[in-house]
Image (cartoon, rainbow, N blue to C red):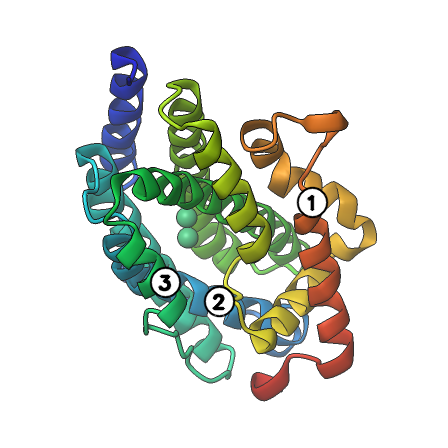
Amino acid sequence: MTHPSSDQRIREHVQRLGEEHPPIELDSVDRFIRDPQTVADRYGHVIDYLARVELEVDRNVLELLVLLPDVSEVDRMFYADVWQPQEIQHGLILDRLQQDLGRPAAEPQLEVSYKMKIMGALAHFSSIQDVARLLYYLTGASTERQAVLAYNVIHAGMEEMAEPAIADTIIAPIRRQEPGHFAFYRMSATELIRSGALRPWQLYLARVLRQKTYNLVGTNGQDRYRAQMGGVVSALGFDADLAKYAREVGRIEAQLLWANEQGMEFPPYVLAALRESIELYRERGFGDIAA
Ligand SMILES: [Fe+2]
Ligand SMILES: [Fe+2]
């Protein structure tokens, strides 16, 4: 049972995003960098990481097609007409910035993982596909939130370093497009839960799977990326209060998937993933792309 007015609201949101936020053109960027070395020292690794993750949008679309074989029209409209065209430009713009900073080009992982293919095979059962849909929305909400938080800090940092071209023509326009993505996933997850379409066993399965597979943005389930993400979290200063960051990233999920059980502000696996990333970073640093 879906609620026509909520469905309509999500559809209008997607249409509005498409109209108000055309993909950012490479030519709109002012490539002036006042002090490339200082920018690279402070944010080089962070930009490398974000460029790769944004460019991996093409793999995310393939995963989505695997995971949701009967994708709904609104979901399709979102990923095909709004999300992918916007994110790929974020990736291309950041990838060029990192090269302007004298760093190597990003190497996005574009192979769909084996685990994802298994999940995709199971998703041909419609009851499993509904679980996959919920996980897709929750993953989207969590990762988009992380993007917003990262771009906020980087924007302030670029202003502080007196790099107005990067702040105003790269980070600000990218940052403007992320909250609309977050809102789409939040609205969609909320509606799926609210509609009562998921039976208790499906919600239970969603909780178990989420607990076992939760990943911070861009870590792809691999330790080398987990370590790099630990470095990103540290460079952006989120390590000073990890619980606060976990709350920002996991609030929606605590509400929707866990009904805030026992006063839960964020699912414990979010904080555990953050701690693990930071530990890995302390052990190995950024790894193969370290400057
Ligand atoms: Fe993005
Ligand atoms: Fe996004």
Q: Residue at x 25, y 18 (%)?
A: 8
Residue at the spot 37% in from the left edge and 45% down from the top edge: 132
Q: Name the disc covering residue 220, or none.
A: 2
User: Number of callouts in the render?
Assistant: 3
As drawn, the label of residue 246 is: 1
Query: Tags 1 and 3 in contact by the CB under 8 Å rule?
Result: no
- Alpha carbon separation for disc pair 1 and 3: 25 Å
Q: Is residue 2 left or right of residue 253?
A: left
Where is residue 99? Give x, y as percent: 44, 79
| Residue found 77% across the figure and 56% down from its top | 239
Describe residue 159's horizontal placement relative to residue 174 as left or right: right
The local crowd at label 3, few if under 14, some if 14 to 19, many if 20 or more residues have their Cα within 10 Å, is some
- Answer whether labels 3 and 2 touch (C-beta < 8 Å): no
Determine the secondary structure under disc 1. Answer: helix
Residue with the mark numbered 3: 116
Could you say where residue 160 lies in the image, as x and y percent from the top left?
68, 55
- Which comes before the other along the chain, label 1 or label 3? 3
Which amino acid type is marked by label 1?
A: Ala
Q: Nearer the viewer, residue 88 or 191?
A: 191
Query: Which quarter of the image is occupied by the C terminus?
Result: bottom right
CB of residue at label 3: within 8 Å of ligand 2?
no
The first of marks 3 and 2 along the sequence is: 3
Residue 191 position (above or below residue 222): above
